[in-house]
Image (cartoon, grey):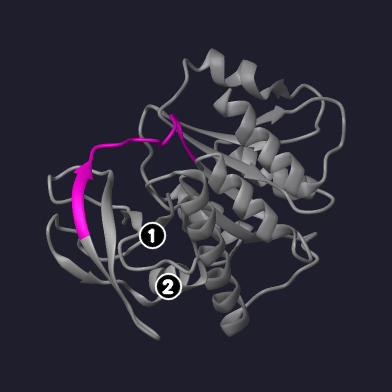
Amino acid sequence: MPRLYCPAPLVSGELLDLPAGAARHAQVLRLQPGDSVTLFNDGPGALGSAGEFSATVARMGRSDVQVQVGAHHLVQREPAPAVHLAVGVPANERMDWLVEKATELGVTSIQPLMTERSVLRLAGDRARKKVAHWQGVAISACEQSGGNRVPLVHEVMGLAAWLDERSGSPTAPSQVSLLLSLRAGSRGLRDAVAALGMPEVITLLSGPEGGLSGAEEEFALGCGFAPVTLGPRVLRAETAAVCALAALRI
């Protein structure tokens, strides 16, 4: 059954004009009146719980789509622990692939970072357009994969500014910060997480092509990040981040 992200209040029994993005998706799928769909919107439903709603297409216009919202279903497909991915933005279209796969694996949020070795440089309007595009990629991946919460793609930040901001924010006892690193002595990712008793929240920092510089790694370690490794092989920037997420889900 098609799944549509609908960032609007959902109430069983109401006739709802779909927001523009969901309406376009329904039209691309060539849905017709009477077809069934599933709606989700990230937040509390009519019953006060996250989940999704069954719905039926009531009308298909040239540029608008109306649905009859049906029953609320208390379905939770978000994996634990919550993982916030901070990543040096890879070049070309590799970030699109990373956002898509990270969303499929249930990442909670994605923080794009500019680092010393970043090939792609983003700022101003160009950065905002890229973030909006990546958020759209995350929505599509969430619709496809069955998730009920779309990960938030944060505004692009420099690594140093992001670390400074984090240092000034309180952290919960059940929250840990991990840095993907090839440095000698780094502990295996899953071993490190197991030793911590599977925390509720993990912040995972991964570099761009070529990794973080030595100075950047030292700065991150000084801000409380623990170095972890995926093994002796050198993975591409986007592959490393996705493999780390997958390892945390197995």
- Which quarter of the picture shows residue 65? bottom left
Magenta stretch bounds: 69-83
Q: Which mark is residue 21?
A: 2
Q: Earlier in the sequence, mark 1 or mark 2?
A: 1
CA separation in Å, label 1 and label 2: 8 Å
Measuring from the top left, give residue 198's x and y in whole percent: 47, 20
Q: Residue at x 52, y 66 (%)?
A: 136
Q: Is residue 33 visible?
A: yes
- The kind of secondary structure element at disc 2 is helix
Measuring from the top left, give residue 236's x and y in whole percent: 82, 46
Q: Is residue 114 left or right of residue 28?
A: right
Measuring from the top left, give residue 163's x and y in whole percent: 55, 52
Q: Nearer the viewer, residue 116 or 52?
A: 52
Q: Is residue 89 magenta?
A: no
Q: Does residue 104 lie above or below 140 as drawn?
A: above
- Which quarter of the picture shows residue 72? top left
Q: Is residue 71 magenta?
A: yes
Q: Residue at x 54, y 77 (%)?
A: 128
Q: Is residue 145 left or right of residue 55?
A: right
- Which quarter of the picture shows residue 23? bottom left
The amino acid at mark 1 is Tyr
Q: Is residue 118 left or right of residue 139?
A: right
CB-based contact (under 8 Å), mark 1 and mark 2: yes
Q: Which mark is residue 5?
A: 1
